[in-house]
Image: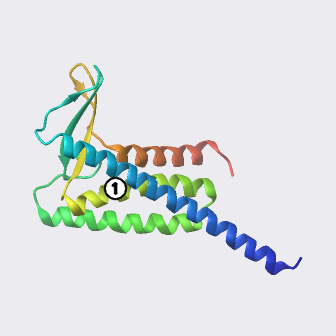
Amino acid sequence: MNIKMFEKKGISLQFQKNLISFFLSICIFIFDRVTKNIIINSQTDNQIVYINDYINLDLIWNTGIGFGLLSYESSLIYNLITLIIGFVILFLIYLILKQNFLDKILFSFIIGGALGNFYDRLTYFAVPDFIDIHYNNFHWFTFNIADIFITIGIIMLISKDIFIKQ
C-alpha cells in the first residue's frame, strides 16, 4: 500500500465526518421548524396550552436575541443583529471543517439551532418562543427547541474544554 491510498482514506474519513455534522445540523433545523410550525398553527388565538404545573406552551414573538435581550423597535438594530448572527453562523460552519469529530458534533448542535432562529428572523422578523417553564409565579425565559440545542452545544463545548484534557 502506498501513501496516496492512506491520504485518500483520510480525506474520505474527514469528508464523512463533515457530512455527518452537516446532516445533524439539518436534522436539528428541521425538528425546530416542525415544532414551531405546530405551535404557530395551533395557537392562532394566543391561548396558553397547560401541560402540567411546571410547563406551559405559550407562543410569544421574540425580536431580540437569547432571552429577549436586545429587543428594540428599531429595524436598523434588528437588521444589524440579524446580519451579525448570519456571520456567526458562517464562522461556525468554517469551524466545523477544522475541528475534531466531537467538536464537529457540538458545533452542529449550535448551528442547527442558530439556523432555525435565523430562518425565523428572516421569515417572520421575530423568533417564535413557546416553552414556558415556571414554578408558581416564577417564570423562566420562554424558549424554543432551537434554543435548547444551542444551549446544549455551548454547555458541552465549555464542559469539554474544562474537564477533558487533550
Horizontal side of 163 relative to 77 (left or right) equals right
Which residue type carries mark 1? Gly
Q: Nearer the viewer, residue 13 or 104?
A: 13
Q: In the figure, residue 41 lies in which quadrant?
A: top left
Residue at left 74%, top 71%?
9
Camera sees residue 69: no
Residue at left 11%, top 61%?
74
Residue at left 14%, top 33%?
47
Q: Nearer the viewer, residue 39 or 76?
A: 39
Horizontal side of 56 relative to 47 (left or right) equals right
Name the spot of residue 49 as percent of width and height, x first.
21, 30
Q: Is residue 129 above or below residue 16?
A: above
Badge 1 density bin: few <14, some 14–19, many ≥20, Cα 10 Å: many
Name the spot of residue 55 as percent of width and height, x first.
29, 27
Horizontal side of 166 relative to 38 (left or right) equals right
Camera sees residue 13: yes
Name the spot of residue 36 as percent of width and height, x first.
28, 47
Q: In the figure, residue 111 lies in which quadrant?
A: bottom left
Q: In the figure, residue 164 lies in which quadrant?
A: top right
> Pointer 1: what residue?
116
Where the N terminus falls, by quadrant?
bottom right
Label 1 sits on a secondary structure element that is helix
